């Protein structure tokens, strides 16, 4: 399998990750909205106000998570899989002597053909470390030297 095919698979896995996360958040938001609607029917005094306040906080939390998912989707949409550069950047497949990283969004490990590929955000510690590196360069992460073998 070529690196380009691997990048395409990883890109689609990131899309699936974001879509799944969005779906779970929207489902939770719907549940909170339903609970708020049910609370509006109740007029039991302090308990009513406490429950309503807690549900409002839940709704705000899920709304912030949804905004983060939308931000991740915007980052993913900036990736041009055809753009190849000798410097690690958004959309790069960075092959090191320790692991292989897809510079995209933090979607975790993706197994392809008995190899784990790690989808990492440019804002993650390893993403920040690899960003701008060239083939042959090295970096130290958690006391471990990482050598960049290839960038695609």
Image (cartoon, rainbow, N blue to C red):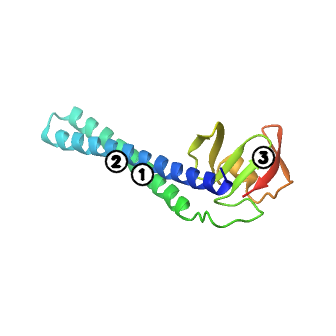
Asked whether the residues under the numbered discs 2 and 1 touch, taking CB atoms below 8 Å apart as contact, a structural biologist would say yes
> Which mark sits nearer the N-terminus, 3 or 1?
1
Quarter where residue 87 is shown:
bottom right
Residue 1: assigned label? none
Q: Is residue 25 above or below residue 89?
A: above
Mark 2 crowd level (few <14, some 14–19, many ≥20, 10 Å Cα): some
Horizontal side of 24 relative to 81 (left or right) equals left
> Which mark sits nearer the N-terminus, 2 or 1?
2
Q: Nearer the viewer, mark 3 or mark 1?
A: 3
The residue at 63%/66% (across/down) is 82
Residue beneath label 2, please? 26
Mark 1 crowd level (few <14, some 14–19, many ≥20, 10 Å Cα): some
Mark pair 3, 2: CA separation: 37 Å
Provide the secondary structure element on which disc 3 rests. Answer: strand
Residue beneath label 3, please? 96
| Quadrant into which the C terminus falls | bottom right
Provide the secondary structure element on which disc 1 rests. Answer: helix
* Position in image of residue 14 (x %, y %): 53, 50
Mark pair 2, 1: CA separation: 8 Å
Provide the secondary structure element on which disc 2 rests. Answer: helix
The residue at 69%/51% (across/down) is 127
Asked whether the residues under the numbered discs 3 and 1 touch, taking CB atoms below 8 Å apart as contact, a structural biologist would say no
> Which mark sits nearer the N-terminus, 3 or 2?
2
Mark pair 3, 1: CA separation: 33 Å
Residue beneath label 1, please? 66
Horizontal side of 13 relative to 95 (left or right) equals left
- Looking at this view, is 76 or 149 the one in front? 149
Horizontal side of 139 relative to 67 (left or right) equals right
């Amino acid at each position: 399998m070529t690196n380009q095919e691997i990048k395409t698979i990883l890109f689609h896995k990131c899309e699936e990750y974001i879509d799944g996360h969005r779906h779970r958040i929207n489902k939770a938001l719907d549940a909170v909205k339903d609970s708020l609607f049910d609370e509006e029917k109740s007029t039991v005094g302090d308990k009513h106000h406490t429950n309503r306040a807690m549900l409002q906080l839940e709704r705000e939390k899920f709304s912030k998570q949804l905004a983060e998912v939308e931000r991740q989707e915007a980052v993913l949409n900036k990736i041009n899989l055809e753009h190849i550069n000798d410097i690690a950047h958004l959309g790069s497949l960075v092959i090191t002597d320790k692991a292989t990283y897809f510079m995209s969004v933090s979607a975790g490990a993706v197994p392809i053909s008995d190899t784990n590929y790690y989808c990492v955000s440019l804002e993650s510690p390893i993403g920040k470390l690899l960003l701008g590196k060239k083939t042959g360069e090295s970096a130290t992460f958690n006391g471990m030297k990482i050598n960049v073998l290839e960038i695609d």
